[in-house]
Amino acid sequence: MRFISKIVSLFLVVNVWALPELKTKQSVKNIRYISQDGKVTYYQKNSGQLQYSTNYDFISVMEKPKNTIYELTVSEGLKKVAIEVIDNPFAKGQWKSDNEIYLVDYISKQTPKLIGQGTSPKLHEKYNVLSYFSTEKNSIVIRKGDFEQEIKLVNKSNPYFIPMIEVLSPNEIVFTDINKEGFQAILLYSLADKTFEVLYKVKSPGLSIELCRTDEFLIAGTFPNSSYYSGSKILMTPLFRGSMTKSWKSIYENAFPDIGNMVCKDNHVYFLHANIYKAQLNERETTIHKVKLDYDNPTTSKQITDFTDANQLFKLGDMIITSKFGKYYIVEGSSPVESDAL
Amino acid sequence: MLQVFFQNLLNNIIKGKTLLPLILFYSFNSFAQNSPGLFQRFTELLSEQKKIYNKLEARAQKNSFSINDIESFDDVNLHFDYINLILFNTPLRYHYFLKKDACAIYDLLVTDLTEMPDYFKDQVFFIYKNKKGKHLRASMPKAKFIKEIVSQKCPGVIKIGQNFETTSLRNTLSQLKINYPEKKPQCEEYFKEFRKAVTSPYLCHIVENIENLKKWNFEYNDFENKNNIALRKKLKQRIDRAKIYQSILNEESFNKLSKTCKYLDDSERGCSELFLENYWVFLYKEKPTSAILKTYCGDKVDQQCINTLSTSTYACMERIHQTSSLGPAANCSQIQQSIKNSRLKSEYIDCPGKSGDETITTFSRILRHFDFYNTEAVSDCSMNSTHPTADFLKEYTELDTWGLNICYDDKIQKKEVCYPVLFGDVKDREYSLSTVIGKVANKLRGFPYQESPCELISKDDYKPALLRFKNGCFIIKNDQQCSATNCDIKVIISEREFNNFKIKREITQNLYPYNYIKENLALIKLLERHKKLKLREIQNISSFKAVYESHPEAIFVGVGCAEDLMPLNFQRTKLNQCRPVPFIVDYLIESGGSFSMQVRTSLDHIHAPRIVPWNYVFSSLKEYQAVHPINLWSFNAIYK
């Protein structure tokens, strides 16, 4: 009996460590968004159409010329969809040109509304805010209903920098920027007062900042971008307990340069951790870790899978996805196809 | 393998690297009746050698030789056993010199690169045909043999030898152009050339003399040799000669030649030795005007800057941060290592962010690497990133597909007339902004642009109140926002704004084809067709290595998803997100069975390569292939 239970536990361990591949009824490469229950799928066609399907019915969202690429951001509460329309990126090589950004309700038959020109739209549903970055204007655009405000970046030297943006309250925006010496920093901007406050600044120009937030905390990761003298760090600061600048607390450190790609979910931060780093090859052996966001009692990070050498980690609806060699794997959440019931 | 093994074995016992010829010599020598075997004691082998020498000497003495007995100098040949003795006593690395031609062995005799034992070093054994047609054995003192026979048989040897005599050496060295490799990938080629060059044995002779100076001085002053007048006289001559060599050959050339001669048979090690020093120091000494140093030191290329680059962690990151390219760059130590290994030609300054089109940036780098449209120095870095592509398309397509034009309504012809343009000036190019605006102003306002060309000026420098701006044509650019392919300009002609033109921007230059109909318009296809360059698809490390090693000029060009290629810089936040980025690979790093590539993406400064693991490169190509309209694998070697 004991022997059988050991075999069962071993089987469970194996199952826990293996990551299921993201598989869908149609080619994954066409999918732009899939809901957790698998009932709603936004996908694009080679002809240039963006459609969504639900209950074996499909609705056309918009249509653009052939080879247009759509990138979709769906708000956490499944209310809005932001669509970035990239005009044939295979024929053009202009990184600094802005794309059309549209907004439409989730699974709605309405025509998407053109919001502006930029890139990397993000929906901050709690405050009904859409943010995006205009590379041509070098500005963050904050849009709430018809109200729009631009925040000009200090960075003038790195033309390929795209800031990370979080909305803390109806009046407060947090974003990353680079100063003229090449140091990244986190800034707090007040929409009402139009004032800035530096919340955190890295100690060397080789460190990049990533941001995510929960209801109570702002989380910042500092990861060595291409210089390998400093290690990696994840810090958190409470949003509503006095000065954010003075309350930063380190919850994770690694002497090796992690890839990062932080994702905040369910009071944890998930990220790509470097177990080994070979400096000559600039090569990391990475695994996916998570650390509990406990400000008062920090805990150590845990490896959640032995899936190695992933180089990306991101959220798709309620799932956390990683990719390797052109395939996508589900880190957290179940495969949508399994629960694709009518 | 065995040869290497025994060579190394002996190196631990004696200096001289002569075991291999020794083994070969005894393996093939017919008169070594009882084969000594590989483990025979070295002293026994030397004694065998002496026996051979004595035999040669005895046979030669039987014949009284006179130079007049020789029927033809073409029929004089070194005795086979004597050739074996030379090979036996010549360090393995100098055997390369023998491959040149039949006279090469005399170069070894003249230069004393053979390390013959003293007792037979001065005598040469040969066979000649006398006037009766009979082949006879003879010997001669070496100096006399060279003067009387080598001068007739191989006059070139004597001529080169004369150029390297102490009296003419200074002049010879000043005229002799040795192309020391500037980067590691060229180093292998340098060694190959050096092995073939006729002057190389003489240069190694000079180096060996300088290296032996200390030893000879010691022997000369050694108490034991005090009464050996003949030896001391010989040593004195050598010392004097070596001192002259030392005074003529500068220290740097000596160091490089010394490493070259020392590692002639091990170029891999030689290349490592040649480039062990800090590459910043190497560049400063060898090429202080290099564009690479200009990138990192600006106009102040001095020792202080070199010291900073050699010691500072962040200096290079901070410099690259000012260059309108993707940051942060690697640290100085990594950058000097990467540039040292680079094959891509990069003697110019570019600024990818100011190009405005990443495809054009990479394609211009490819053209410049193969020395197309690379003749002039352009001070505007954004033009360096773009004008070679414009020149190429001008030559082969008349810029029909350029997609960036300044247009005006021609009221006489009743049609819109457009001129292809770049937002900057390159000498004598019709697409230069000042020429295009001048032409339009000439058509619409009769402005004499040929006599009084329009002037490009930055927004900050334009002060309309100044006298110099009262007359003439001024094109005002906002440098902060302008790139070579995207710019809002303002034109003022004699204090009046001139705006009767439109800028039409629809640049669609693609490196690789994205559909079958326009496949031949892809830049890489045009390059293959018009410049006769070869393309080869690279799917794996083996094919990469095969092309890299067999084509010294080959570079590797790909387009992949930035999110996979540089996950630290570009985080994927959406499913199937892929921002295509062109890149060039020019070096492969191998360690413990893993591979990384030296990559310059279109976003990186040309002097700030990055090291990217092969699995990232592969992932980026694979992901790009998956989203590509014709599922193209976009990674190719390009070579001549």
Image (cartoon, coloured by chain):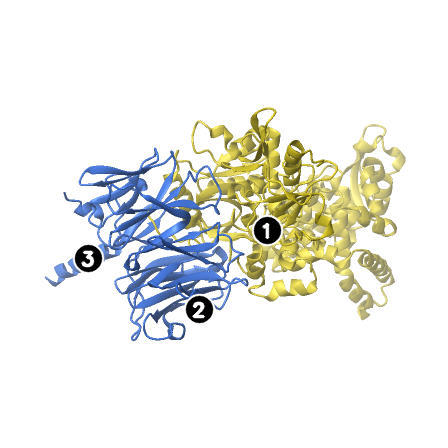
Chain colours: A blue, B yellow
Residue, far left: A1
Q: Is B73 positioned to the left or the right of A303 in the image? A: right
Q: Quadrant of the C terminus of chain B?
A: top right
Circle 1/circle 3 CB separation < 8 Å: no
Instruction: Report the residue at 13% width, 61% height from top.
Output: A5
> Which dot, 3 or 2, sits closer to the camera?
2
Q: Is B85 positioned to the left or the right of B159 in the image? A: left
Circle 3/circle 2 CB separation < 8 Å: no
Q: Is residue A209 visible?
A: no
First in residue order: circle 3 vs circle 2: 3
Q: Residue type at mark 1?
A: Asp
Residue at mark 3: A12
Q: Nearer the viewer, residue B573 or A272?
A: B573
Instruction: Tell me the quarter of the picture where residue A249 sits.
Output: bottom left
Q: Is A121 positioned to the left or the right of B121 in the image? A: left
Answer above or below: position of B179 versus B69.
below
Return the x and y of residue B471 as percentages of the image width and height.
Answer: 72, 44
Residue at mark 2: A197
Q: CA distance from mark 1 to mark 3?
A: 62 Å
Q: Is B558 positioned to the left or the right of B465 in the image? A: left
Q: CA distance from mark 3 to mark 2?
A: 49 Å
How busy is the neighbourhood of tag 1: few (under 14 within 10 Å), some, or many (20 plus)? Answer: few
